[in-house]
Amino acid sequence: MDTLCITGGRVLHPDGRVREDDIVVDRDEGTILAVGGDGTVADHVDGASETLDATGGLVIPGLVNAHTHVSMTLLRGYADDKPLDAWLREDVWPAEAELTDDDIEVGAELGVLEMIRSGTTAFADMYFAVDRVADVVDRAGLRARLGHGVVTIGKGEEAAVADVEESLAVAADLDGAADGRVRTAFMPHSLTTVGEEYLREGLERAAADGIPVHLHANETREEVDPILEERGERPIEYADDIGALGEGNFLAHCVHVDDAEIELLAGTGTAAVHCPASNMKLASGMAPVQRLREAGVTVALGTDGAASNNDLDLFDEMRDAAMVGKLAADDASAVPAGAVVEMATAGGADALGLPGGRIAEGAAADLAVVDLGAPHLTPVHDPVSHLAYAVRGSDVRHTVCDGRVLMRDREVLTLDADAVRARAAEAASDLVSRVEEGA
Ligand SMILES: N[C@@H](CCSC[C@H]1O[C@@H](n2cnc3c(=O)[nH]cnc32)[C@H](O)[C@@H]1O)C(=O)O
Ligand SMILES: [Zn+2]
């Protein structure tokens, strides 16, 4: 059998406990064969095809970034310090109008490079030229749930219909790509940027074909108020009416949700993706994470695009989620360390319906080894506390997805990091020149 052994470290188990254990991975299946102390895995360690040294480190499930627009790395730092609506209309959408499919591929390469280097092994992405993003996921070796984002406002009937068709076609055609590591979803952008007739049509067809749904919801007050005024119901109630809720579906943000909306999410099994950094940066508000979790809603974490974050490091997101969760609840015991670690791992995998998120026999071998030796991580009273409050993405030593080593001793093996950075910097500067010429 072709095995990978991860030895000498401590392991974070699904119950939140940390023990000194070795891990044996079946590389053919991409799954964890055994987790345990010396006796359990010793037989395999000697005959292993490949070994990763986790001495002085903590093995954690690969992190799950449950909402991003990965190619937006090209727009990192391009437009800051504005609220969502102005930021999208004045800066982001005009720049995106100039993006080529090649730009999207290069931006995705840069984004997944950053993710692998910070211990993320799975993500959900809403963008366009999704076949190019899927190609990058295939080459880079991680997992993703991908979709084409639909926007119909400002479009004529024909273009709007075509956008919905494209999203449904992408979801059907790309599902199962990259040896099954790519899954898909129907992705209307939001309840206000897609017209009701298009939403209803797309959602009905997605449901009929068993395709999951992902959209931005209740991100800002400016998005909630018009729906309330026009329809006399809250956005999540509207989402329920038109068939956007259900098991397998996941909504980004859920910042401005009331108790009845939280109950609807919980009752329908719809997951919420909390994006604290993006919500803070665009001053959108604070999601009631503690209340969502108490109601039984699956809550995951997302960075959103690099233009509103401005990085894809989920360790930052865990810390932000804990901090802002306490502030929102006016309670220092709210959203504790263990909760944010769960949201970034099992919660993310569950929200996206992807394997991974737990280190256990039979689970997908999606892992990261975090070095605990740095001064900012000394002493180690509680490794879980460190994951939430002190670890940075740059502390990740090795990253493994589907049993394959994507980064060993901080060297990414599936992408040429220098070439990716150079291509992305060039593509970004060309893009900005084109936007300026057009303006
Ligand atoms: N097919 C659409 C593209 C939608 S992709 C998803 C969109 O979400 C945008 N986006 C990024 N971050 C956010 C956010 O925080 N809220 C809402 N939209 C965002 C992003 O810029 C991108 O245009 C079109 O023709 O424009
Ligand atoms: Zn977004």
Image: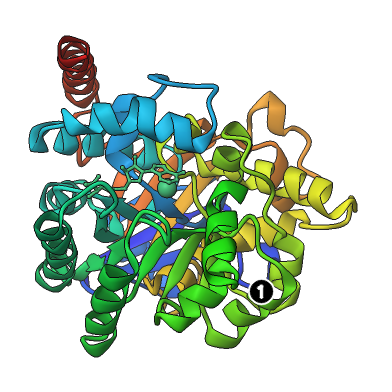
Residue 339 in the image, given as x and y percentages of width and height: 70, 61
Is 56 left or right of 408, judged from the image as shown?
A: right
Indicate the quadrant containing the N terminus: top left, top right, bottom left or bottom right. bottom left
Above or below for 215 versus 355: above
Q: Is residue 31 visible?
A: yes
Above or below for 205 versus 82: below
Q: Which amino acid does label 1 sit on?
A: Ile
Which residue appears at 27% of the width and 38% of the height?
71
- Of residue 406 and residue 41, the one placed in the foreground of this image is 406
Above or below for 334 versus 322: below
Residue 352 in the image, given as x and y percentages of width and height: 41, 69
Indicate the quadrant containing the C terminus: top left, top right, bottom left or bottom right. top left
Residue 216 in the image, given as x and y percentages of width and height: 45, 57
Above or below for 253 versus 110: below
Q: Is residue 185 visible?
A: no
Which residue appears at 18% of the width and 19% of the height?
431
Residue at numbered disc 1: 262
Is 287 left or right of 126, judged from the image as shown?
A: right
Which residue appears at 38% of the width and 19% of the height?
78
* Label 1 packing within 10 angstroms: few (<14), some (14-19), many (20+): many
